[in-house]
Image: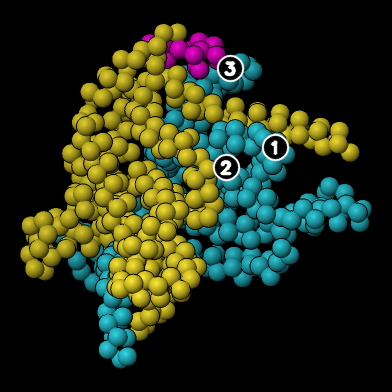
Amino acid sequence: MISKKKINAVIAILCMTLLSVVMFAPILLMFSTSLKSMGEISSREGLLRFFVPVKAHFSNFTEALQQGDWNRYFYNTFLVTVVTVIISLVINSMAGFAFARLNFKGRDQLFFIGLVGLMIPPQATVIPVFFILKNFPLAGGNNMLGRGGMGFINTHFALMAPYLAGSFGVFLFRQFFLNFPQALDDAARIDGLSRFGAFLRIHVPLSKPVFASLLVMKATQCWNEYTWPLIVTTTDRMRTLQIALVIFKDEVHTQWNYMMAMTLIIIAPLAILFLLAQKAFVEGIVTSGIKG
Amino acid sequence: MKKKNSHNDLVGYAMIAPYYLFLFLFILVPVGVNLFMSFTDYNLNTMNFVGISNYLRLFRDPILKKSVVNTLLYTVITLASTISCGLLVAILITQTGRLIPVFRTFVFLPYVVSMASASMIWLWIYEPGYGLLNAILKVFNLPMQSWIYDVKLALICVSVVSFWKLLGYNMVMYTSGLLGIPQHLYEAAKIDGANALHRFRYITLPMLRPTTFFLLVTGFINNFNVFEQVKILTNGGPVNSTTTVMHQIYNRGFVDYQFGYASAITVLMMIVVSIITAVNFKFGSKGHDLDLS
């Protein structure tokens, strides 16, 4: 019986090793290509040469950074990610707390309306949100009726706007806060804390895991977003990292080495975060069960 | 008492106010705005009411028809492959004991890579002149292919990129499902003489039904909105063989500035997604009453 189990384990390990090699091959290819010269890339040598450069050209990274305003793209992506994560965590935790621990008229109905927002795929709102941002009254040269200018189009706010609320985060926080004992609220009140004070001093410090998993989720989403920045930015200065990658590709030929070098740099922050906090990352994804 | 209650009301409203502001402005109101726009010919400058002519055009648009077929095909291929292989890999990985975290790192890593970056890497792999895939074919003396430039292969190529990125996600979800199945069920089945296949068929599959259901519903919605891979890898080509509904919405709206028509396509897409999600709920959630733990 035991030997059969061992054979199973060996077969599983062999299969998983093979799969791991296949899954990692594209990432390894990105690594090696980022270090090659264009001459070597187009030389069509043996299969192994794809993954091992003849000579490592580390200068590819600095040369790639000089094609385009990468400082600015990094700044844009970084700013949008950080601000969106902070604002959405504040907004979501407050709303989740109110829905879970406060009594006010229409609470459950209001929460249910929020859940409807979960069922609307973000892609279904790109056109109307674009329209609303463009015609926002008194913004970006618009008059009172939202006419005349470009509104919020091509601004950092436009890049953040659709991601600031997020019913999912509210839902997650509410579920978490519901599990707190009522005695905690009572004790806080007896000690003279207001409801908001109790939230700040008791509930927030006790809910680090939810903050952590939502932070990972939101940061991944913002950092990796492609469609929305493509739509809502119109000038080179407002480009984000993900949409700036096309710089290295034109109609006739692509600078694969530079493109792979920048792809590597763009992937690195999240990949390192994942490797360092793998357990939290995976658990966050399982419990939240939503696309990043 | 009354006074205290009303104070509580105010704190509650104040705390949900920021959330509700953004929820209304950027999620709920847009659905209404979208419906309204689908009856107009808005083109960034002028807007006239045009009745249902946008909706009539939906039925006479051959490229849109092609895009619906492509989207459904892509969704079925990607969903079926990621869910079935995700389960298979989850079963394999749970047998590897202490090596689970190592293998999980390799299989899950592509999920962390953004779709734009993943598409760039695969663009290079699919490169017809000196890309990796054709180099592999050459080793085996097989004829070279043009991959994403081939009408027959392009859509499969796009699906493969999604498969590569999403397999780890499906695997992780199934792994946690598998680890949640109580071991005593398998032991009891063994005593009753059930073989491995029976145990899989009558214990593993039914116990994983909630996971499968979740992956099916969310996977359907996500895959049906496929856009990034298509935009970067093929931009809908060759000869519209990979254009998808979302790609059509983008092109009609943000390339041609026919926002009214693009809104009508969006309404169509939302109706299709809602119907199929409802069907999934009707036939897929039966397993929810199964609770043996």
Residue B164, image x, y percentages: 54, 38
When the figure is inspected, residue B219 is found, relative to residue A51, above or below; the finding is below
**Mark 3 = which residue?**
B138
For residue A37, which quarter of the picture? top left
Same chain for mark 3 and mark 1? The answer is: yes
Q: Which residues are magenta?
A: A39-53
Disc assigned to residue B216:
none
Q: Is residue B113 left or right of residue A153?
A: right
Circle 2/circle 1 CB separation < 8 Å: no
The chain letter corresponding to cyan is B
**Mark 2 = which residue?**
B167
Residue A239, image x, y percentages: 24, 40
The residues tagged by marks 3 and 1 sit, at their Cα atoms, a distance apart of 38 Å
Q: Amino acid at mark 1?
A: Gly
* Residue B17 appearing in the image: yes
The residues tagged by marks 2 and 3 sit, at their Cα atoms, a distance apart of 28 Å
Same chain for mark 2 and mark 1? The answer is: yes
* Residue at x-position 37% and y-position 60%: A204
Of the two numbered discs 3 and 1 in the rendering, the one whose residue sits closer to the viewer: 1
Question: Mark 2 or 1 closer to N-term?
Answer: 1
Q: Main secondary structure of the magenta part?
A: loop
The residue nearer to you, when weighing A260 against A285, is A285
Question: Mark 2 or 3 closer to N-term?
Answer: 3
